[in-house]
Image (tube, helix red, strand yellow):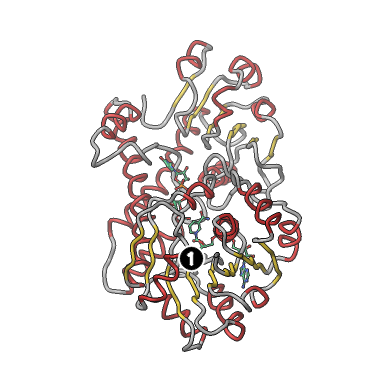
Amino acid sequence: MGSRIAVIGTGYVGLTTGACFAHLGHDVVCADVDEAKIERLRSGEVPILESGLEEMVREGLRSGRLRFVVGAAGAVRDAEFAYLCVPTPQGLDGSADLSYIEAAAREIAPHLPPAAVVVNKSTVPVGSTRFVEQALGRSDVFVVSNPEFLREGSAVTDFLHPDRIIIGSDDQSAAIRVAALYLDVPAPLMVTDPASAETIKYASNAFLATKLSFVNAIAAVCEAVGADVNDVVLGMGYDKRIGHEFLKPGPGWGGSCFPKDSRALLYLAKEAGYHFDLLEGVISVNHEQFERVVEKIRRMVGTLEGSTVAVWGLTFKANTDDLRESPSLEIVGRLLDSGAVVRGYDPTVRGPLDQLPGLQVCDDPYAACGGADVLAVLTEWDEFKWLDLDKVGEQLRHRQVVDGRNLLDRSALARRGFRYEGIGRT
Ligand code: NAD
Ligand code: UGA
C-alpha cells in the first residue's frame, strides 16, 4: 500500500519527486501556483527538458496515482506527507530567501490532517526545520528534513538511484515514516538530526563546487607551465581517494543551485561565527574563470569592440534547457558589454532572451558562425563534437576557436588551419 503524498512546487525537484513517488506506488497530488503549468501537466506535457520525466508523468496520470492541482491548500487535505519543493533563491545579503517556504507552510497549515509529516526537500539553511514548525504553528504535525541531491538532466535516474537518502529529524517515528517511502529505492539511508541533514546538503554542493574551482585553478597552472589539464585530471583520478568524477575543467560553474548555495553557506557560517575563507576563494576563482574565458576570446580577436563572436551552448550545462546562472550567459554578457556582436546557438534555446536582448540567437550552429571572428564553445552539448568542421571553417571570417569545454577535436581543427585554445592546454 502506497502513502498519500502532497508535493508543493512542480519545478525540477517537485515534479521529479511527485512523478517518481507515483512510480514507486504512492498516491501523489502535486500543487503549483502557476495555473498554466498545472494545465500542461494535467495533459501530460512536461514544461522542462528532463530525460524520462514526461514518460513518468504520463505513467502516473494513466495509473491515477499522480494528480495536479492549483494551490497548495487543495493538495494536502488527505496527505500523510507534504513535501515542500519551492524555490529558496539567494537573498540580497547572500542568505537563502525562505519567503516561498514560509508562504507555502502558512498556506497548508490550516488544512493538514493531524500527524501529517511536512518534509523540507528544498535546500534550506540550518534552523529551517524549526522555522517551518513555527510557520505551521501546529503542534500535532511533524517537520522533517529530506534534502535532494538530484542533478538536472538526470533527475529521474538520480531520484530513483541516489547515492544516499538523508533524513533529518528529532522525532524517530516521523523519520521512520519518511524512510518507509523509499523502501524500493536501493540506496544507503541515513537518519540524523535536522541541523546535520541541512548541513550535509550545503556541504555537498560546496564540496563539488570546490572540486570544480580547484580543477579550473589547476587548468590555469597547466597553461602557465605547459601541462595538459585533461591528462592531469586523468592521472589524478586514478587515485581512488580523488576519483574521476566531477573534474572536467570548464568556463566556470553555474546553474540554479551552486552559486546561491555556496553564498548561503558562506552567510550561514559567518552568522554562526566562522569565516569560511576557503569557500570565498572557491567563489572568486569561479568569477575569475568567467573572465579568463573572456580574455582568451579577446586575445584571439585582438579587440572585442566591433568583433563578432559565435557562441555554441547557452545553457549552464548540457542536457538541460535551464539557463539560470549559466556561465555561458555570464560570458556572453561580458562580451556584449565590451562591444562585441554575439551570435549564439543552443539546441534547446530559441531567442531572443529577455535577460540578454543584445544576443542574436540563431536556430542553427553553422548560421551562428556566419561572418564571426572566433567561435567559443561554452556548453558541452554532444552534438557539437560531430558538426562538419569544413562547413564551420567556411562560415567563419577567421578560423579561430576558444573551446571552453575542451570538447572539440583539436587535431582535426589544426589540420583545417584553425587556431585553437582550450582550457588548461597550451
Ligand atoms: P523551480 O523554480 O524549478 O520550481 C519551483 C516551483 O515552485 C515553481 O513551479 C513555482 O511556481 C512553485 N511554487 C512557488 N511557490 C509555491 C507555492 N506557495 N505553492 C505551490 N507552488 C509554488 O525550483 P527547483 O529547481 O525545483 O528547486 C526547488 C528547491 O530544490 C530549491 O530549494 C533548490 O535549491 C532545491 N534543489 C534543486 C535542485 C535542482 O537541480 N534544480 C536539486 C536539488 C535541490
Ligand atoms: C548540482 C549537484 O550536482 C546536485 O547534486 C545538486 O542536487 C544540485 O546541484 C542542486 O542542489 O541543485 P546541477 O546544478 O544540476 O546539480 O548541475 P551539475 O551537474 O552539478 O553542474 C553544475 C555546474 O558545474 C555546471 O555549470 C557544469 O557545467 C559544471 N561542471 C560540472 C563542470 O564544469 N565540470 C564538471 O566536471 C562537472
Residues packed near mark 1 inside 10 Å, few (<14), some (14 to 19) or many (20 plus)? many
Left/right of residue 29 with respect to residue 265 in the rendered view: right
Q: Compare residues 204 and 384 and report the one nearer the observer.
A: 204
* Residue 365 percent location from the top left of the image: 65, 29
Residue at the spot 36% in from the left edge and 49% down from the top edge:
208
Task: From this view, report whether residue 156 is shown above or below residue 198.
Answer: above
Task: Find residue 374 and report its horizontal and vertical position in percent.
Answer: 56, 27
Report whether residue 344 is seen.
no
Identify the residue position indicated by label 1 in the image.
Answer: 121
Which amino acid lies under the numbered mark 1 shown in the image of this protein? Lys
Q: Is residue 244 left or right of residue 91?
A: left
Side of 395 relative to 400 (left or right): right
**What element does badge 1 sit on?**
loop
Query: Which of these two is toward me, 325 or 69?
Result: 69
User: Residue sitting at 59 percent across and 70 percent down?
Assistant: 6
Which quadrant, please, contains the C terminus? top left
Residue for point 57% across, 22% down: 386
- Residue under the image location 33 percent in, 40 percent down: 215
